[in-house]
Image (tube, rainbow, N blue to C red):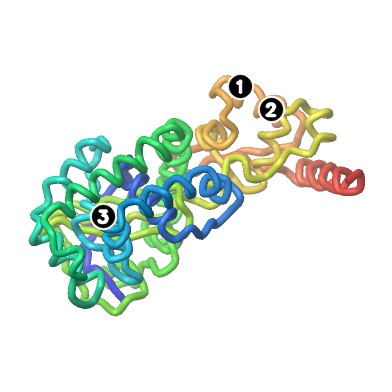
Amino acid sequence: MGWWQINADTLAGSRFVISPFAEAFGSLRLLHTAEAAHPGERRWLDAHLPDYRRRLAGDPVTALLVRAGIGKEWTADFLAPTPRDGETFEQAVAQVRAACPAGARADLTVSLRGPVPALLERDDLPERAADLLTYVWTTAVEPYWDQRRRVLEADVVARTAQVSRGGWASALDTLRPGTRWLGENRLQVNAHEYPPREISGAELVFVPITTQRIGWVSWEGTDRYALVYPCAGALADPGGRPVPASLAALLGPARAGVLVRLGSPLSTSQLVAVTGQGLGSVGRHLRVLLDAGLVERRRAGRSVLYSRTAAGQVLVEAQNGSGTRRS
């Protein structure tokens, strides 16, 4: 397993950050694997995979670059620079474009675990990678960025609350498969057999992305480290669970949508993200549902989390059942 040695001060100073570039690179990897984790990802792939494949079919060099750079256990370093807090996509992709060509080819030998194919023995690989990432961002990520950013912000709220409730160990154990706190100042970052790294005193950031089967680690020298992880599954597919028509008729579609989403505890900001409703509307719906005894709230650190009561659960399950019988 790969693990990092990290002291208490470094962990206490770490933070969650949102990175447009990490979201774009995660989306590129999803296009590369074409393996959807839920219906929302399937719809996104259906919309964007055909054009992506056409683009690569017309550019065999870049197609080979993607296959070589995104390995099963390692991604070529120059393709995924370590995210920075507040960094725009344009600033991050400029780092890819400015990568040293010889260094890029050396990175590929690591991801390939062998020599670089003759077709990739050229100096324009960083530029090609930057152009492809820019294409993915502008056509397949940026149009959804407002919604995705809200989902990522909601995940950060949830993780921060988890740290407040149970400490860093509880939060790190649930980031992604292969990541867990081992004790004795050791953080397991993946299941691969890589040498441990001493990162005490370095800057450490945790970066959520919406793609669900994808995550990675990266570092810049010995000063900056990042662990990129899939955001909470309950948030990842805002349109994933339909609202039963009978429940919508009873409560109204918007209020029913809030109740359906509260099968697991969510904050107000998370509900805004997953329902697409405004903050004021979500607040009004929660007050009505609280008064009716269908939801309850509890404080977790600085956050307030809402969830369905037993009565709310019975109502949702009953309406789901009636909808099934009608079909």
The number of numbered discs placed on residues in the rendered structure image is 3
Circle 3 sits in a helix, a strand or a loop, which is it? strand
Disc 2 packing (10 Å; few <14; some 14–19; many ≥20): some
Residue 268 image-quadrant placement: top right
Is residue 268 toward the left or the right of residue 286 in the image?
left
Q: Nearer the viewer, residue 23 or 17?
A: 23
Relative to residue 165, is residue 154 depicted above or below?
above
Disc 2 target residue: 254
C-alpha gap between disc 1 and disc 2: 9 Å
CA separation, marks 3 and 2? 37 Å
Going by the numbered disc 1, the residue's amino acid type is Ser
Q: Return the x and y of residue 300 as percentages of the image width and height.
A: 50, 44
Question: Label 1: which residue?
Answer: 281
Whether residue 169 is visible to the viewer of this picture, yes or no, is yes
Identify whether 207 is placed above or below 272.
Answer: below
**Distance between mark 3 and mark 1 Cα atoms:** 36 Å
16 lies above or below 176:
above
Callout 1: few (<14), some (14-19), or many (20+) C-alpha neighbours within 10 Å?
few
Q: Residue at x 31, y 59 (%)?
A: 66
Residue 131 position in % (x across, y down):
25, 43
Looking at the image, which is closer to me, 226 or 109?
109
